[in-house]
């Protein structure tokens, strides 16, 4: 089926006893058994839930994968994937990854003797140099958060295949509407569904998707054994939201192009990080790798840009009224954030400096409001500088 059709129908069918068109919220912790061990496929709420299963089937279809497992947050998804590994294994990770991901590996998994290092995954030679004998997992975020650096997924998938490691891609920024890493050879895709997939800033969730049966079997085991599962209500909200994912992504992408160009033309903005701008160093890769399901390039709704320094950024933010100053991203409402004091505050200052994350950086998550109103808001902010 086409992506739009799958977004609305995949994993769902009218409920059998009542004919309810919408998958109900199966708000139950346990299920009746006719006799010991005789049940209808569901025994206990952590192990399985029909609302959760509908969401998992839906998101597997959208990522063009066979198996999906839902979690209570994006970090729960990441941490469950990390538990595929063993003490002594090494994880190589995109340098400019979401701060919480690096924090988890550095400050939690390090206690379990899981080795971790970061590398510029946009440079294949650097990845090869950073590779160790113990490297078992390459964790890639593309575009990266918040500097919008792209990594070539097909090339990295080939490398991982040759060296026997798993390629895990955090696809949160683009959603499967604009990027499907499994089609490019990735082993695992994960999302913070909190973001574009749910799209309404009212749920925290995560999902892990794979085509590999042996990885899927272990993930299913971990989902139940570790237990970071989402509530049936949260699954239902996300399932409702995926129906409009294509519409939201298209609108946000369209508006983001206009806003990125506007910022690019402003003399008060030092640099704009947006893969849709021809001056982005990886614009060509973006056009090749970030395709909607119908083959048209898309660049998503995330834009970062540099102002002179923190004080300038603060003055700019004072003038902003429509974008809400908040962490998170991917909602229908536009958000604005100052990464070094908010989302990336946990990244050590030295590391921030090394990867070029400056105090003047501002990040936009473009929603689906009228673009004229968003433009006016940015212009008002810039006038405060
Ligand atoms: C790219 C990315 N991955 C993962 C996460 C973690 O997801 P969650 O906040 O749902 O745990 C975030 C959160 O901001 C994110 O931006």
Image: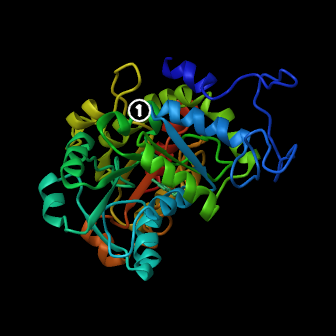
Residue 234 is at least partly visible in this image = yes
Residue 288 vertical placement versus 1 (above, below): below
How dense is the environment of label 1, judged by Cα within 10 Å: few (below 14), some, or many (20 and up)?
many
Q: Which residue occupies 63% across, 53% down?
A: 204
Quadrant location of the C terminus in the rendered image: bottom left
Within the image, what quadrant is residue 171 found in? top left
Residue 244 vertical placement versus 311 (above, below): above
Within 8 Å of ligand 1, the CB of disc 1? no
Q: Which residue occupies 80% across, 44% down?
A: 38
Q: Residue furthest bottom?
A: 111
Residue 100 at x, y percent in the picture:
47, 66
Element type where label 1 sits in the image: helix
Q: Which residue occupies 78% across, 22% down?
A: 21
Residue 298 at x, y percent in the picture:
37, 30
Residue 39 at x, y percent in the picture:
79, 42
Residue 327 is at least partly visible in this image = no
> Which residue position holds label 1?
178
Q: Which residue occupies 24% across, 40% down?
A: 154
């Amino acid at each position: 089926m086409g992506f739009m059709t799958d977004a609305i129908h995949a994993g769902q069918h009218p409920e059998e006893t009542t004919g309810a068109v919408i998958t109900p919220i199966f708000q139950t912790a346990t299920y009746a058994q006719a006799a010991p061990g005789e049940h209808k496929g569901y025994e206990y709420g952590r192990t399985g839930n029909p609302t959760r299963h509908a969401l998992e089937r839906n998101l597997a279809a959208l990522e063009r994968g066979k198996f999906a497992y839902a979690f209570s947050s994006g970090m729960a998804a990441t941490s469950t994937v990390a538990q595929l590994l063993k003490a002594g294994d090494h994880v190589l990770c995109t340098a400019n990854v979401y701060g919480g991901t690096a924090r988890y590996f550095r400050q939690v998994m390090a206690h379990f003797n899981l080795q971790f290092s970061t590398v510029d995954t946009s440079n294949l030679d650097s990845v090869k140099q950073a590779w160790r004998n113990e490297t078992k997992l390459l964790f890639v975020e593309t575009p990266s958060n918040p500097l919008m650096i792209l990594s070539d997924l097909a090339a990295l998938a080939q490398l991982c295949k040759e060296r026997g490691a798993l390629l895990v891609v955090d696809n949160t920024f683009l959603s499967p509407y604009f990027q499907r890493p499994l089609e490019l050879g990735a082993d695992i895709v994960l999302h913070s569904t909190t973001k574009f997939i749910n799209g309404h800033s009212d749920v925290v969730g995560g999902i892990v998707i794979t085509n590999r049966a042996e990885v899927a079997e272990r993930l299913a085991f971990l989902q139940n054994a570790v237990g970071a599962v989402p509530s049936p209500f949260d699954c239902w909200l996300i399932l409702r939201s995926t129906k409009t994912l294509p519409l939201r992504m298209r609108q946000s992408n369209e508006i983001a192009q206009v806003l990125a160009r506007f910022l690019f033309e402003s003399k008060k903005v030092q640099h704009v990080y947006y893969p849709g701008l021809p001056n982005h160093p990886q614009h060509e890769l973006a056009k090749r790798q970030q395709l909607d399901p119908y083959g048209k390039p898309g660049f998503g709704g995330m834009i970062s840009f540099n102002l002179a320094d923190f004080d300038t950024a603060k003055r700019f933010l004072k003038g902003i009224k429509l974008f809400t100053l908040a962490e998170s991203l991917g909602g229908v409402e536009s958000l604005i954030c100052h990464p070094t004091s908010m989302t990336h505050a946990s990244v050590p200052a030295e590391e921030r400096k090394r990867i070029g994350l400056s105090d003047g950086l501002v990040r936009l998550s473009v929603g689906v409001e009228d673009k004229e109103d968003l433009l006016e808001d940015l212009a008002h902010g810039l006038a405060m500088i």
